[in-house]
Image (cartoon, rainbow, N blue to C red):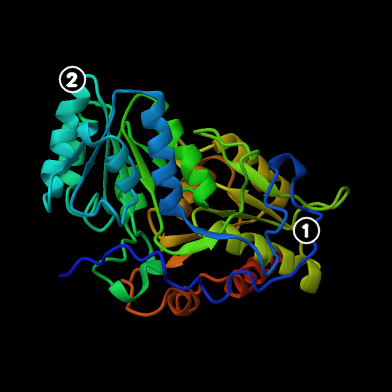
Amino acid sequence: MERSACDNSREPLAFYGAWSYHISMINPKMHLNPDLFKPEVKLEAIRVGFGRGLLAAAHADKNVVGLCADLTESTRMIDFAQSYPDRFFEVGVAEQGLVTAAAGMALAGKVPFVSSYAAFSPGRNWEQIRTTVCINDVNVKIAGSHAGVSVGPDGATHQMLEDIALMRVLPRMTVVVPCDAVEAEKATRAVAAMVGPAYIRLAREKSPLVTMAETPFELGRAAVLRVPPEGRAADLTIAACGLEVYQALVAAETLASEHGVEAEVINVAVIKPLDTTTIIASARRSGAVLTAEEHQAAGGLGGAIAELLTEQYPVPMIRVGLNDRFGESGTPDELLEYFGLTAPHLVKRALELIKRKKA
């Protein structure tokens, strides 16, 4: 099974930047990218934001160290490795040793970041993460790159679709799924400053910058990015994470302009600890919840929200993700379309949910 090298020259996803909507209902408190729905919207890979965030965290704290499993350039740990060669450790193709060594460094007072493809970490070394990191409650940060079907031609072996479920079930583990490169940089700096195990999920492909430097980010908080017009109640809530946040915002604009349906859109960048207050409040306002993630529909963001609402505020709900199947090889845009993860598909599922709500 051959590992793919870093590929920053890959063309952006075909459907990105192809929308032009009026965005007056974007929550002004969120300070989102004003070019969000324009053809010239800037694209950047989420993993690049991780690289910037790690370098900034290293500048701020001399105890930050980096370990990688033979994928330094692809995971964008390369800038850290070049800037701090005495604080970087290449362990080779040995993911179990990757986190075990990091756990030892954390016990010695370091703040280790480990990076690999998500298919290998946590895909291959989950038991070591559980035993050496979580049971011992040590301060290790795990960056799982190239997650989701947007990895593209690498196929099912490299398209990690179960990692959110694997990591959020671990006691003491914080789980973060940034929606863009800007948020990934903030998330990396935030998990470096916190104490305890953390997992950051990163996508390979370039995607629209949804947020800006001014956009708030806080561990344990979800962000309401879109609200209905004043005096108009929300017909549904769309809760999304990762690349699906952009798709959710596009879907919400389509629902409003073409169907008269108003959606409240939430960026749930932190899957664990889940912001139960924001999610339940939105469910109370809208009475229906659609979740969207580039992950298995079971066990991830949709699973976490379904568990919450079932116990505390049951409402009609649809989870959008992959339905109990593995990915396939193809271009990223082909795969996101094929698996129903693009905005038009979210619109269809939202309209189904509205019918169910009315019934």
As displayed, is residue 45 above or below residue 330? above
**Residue 108 disc label:** 2
6 displayed left or right of 10: left
Q: Residue at x 48, y 48 (%)?
A: 178
User: Where residue 140 sits: x, y (%)?
Assistant: 27, 32
User: For residue 253, which quarter of the picture?
Assistant: bottom right
As displayed, is residue 61 above or below residue 310? above
User: Where residue 283 sits: x, y (%)?
Assistant: 65, 47
Badge nearest the viewer, 1 or 2 = 2
User: Where residue 81 sits: x, y (%)?
Assistant: 27, 41
164 displayed left or right of 210: left
- One can see residue 146 in this view: yes
190 displayed left or right of 287: left
Helix, strand or loop at disc 2?
A: loop
* Kind of residue at disc 2: Ala
Q: Residue at x 48, y 59 (%)?
A: 293
**Total tally of numbered discs in the picture:** 2
- One can see residue 297 in this view: no
Q: Which of the marked residues, 1 or 2, is nearer the chain's N terminus? A: 1
User: Where residue 330 sits: x, y (%)?
Assistant: 37, 80
Identify which residue, 352 or 330, lies in the foreground: 330
Residue found at the very far top of the displayed protein: 109
* Kind of residue at disc 1: Ile
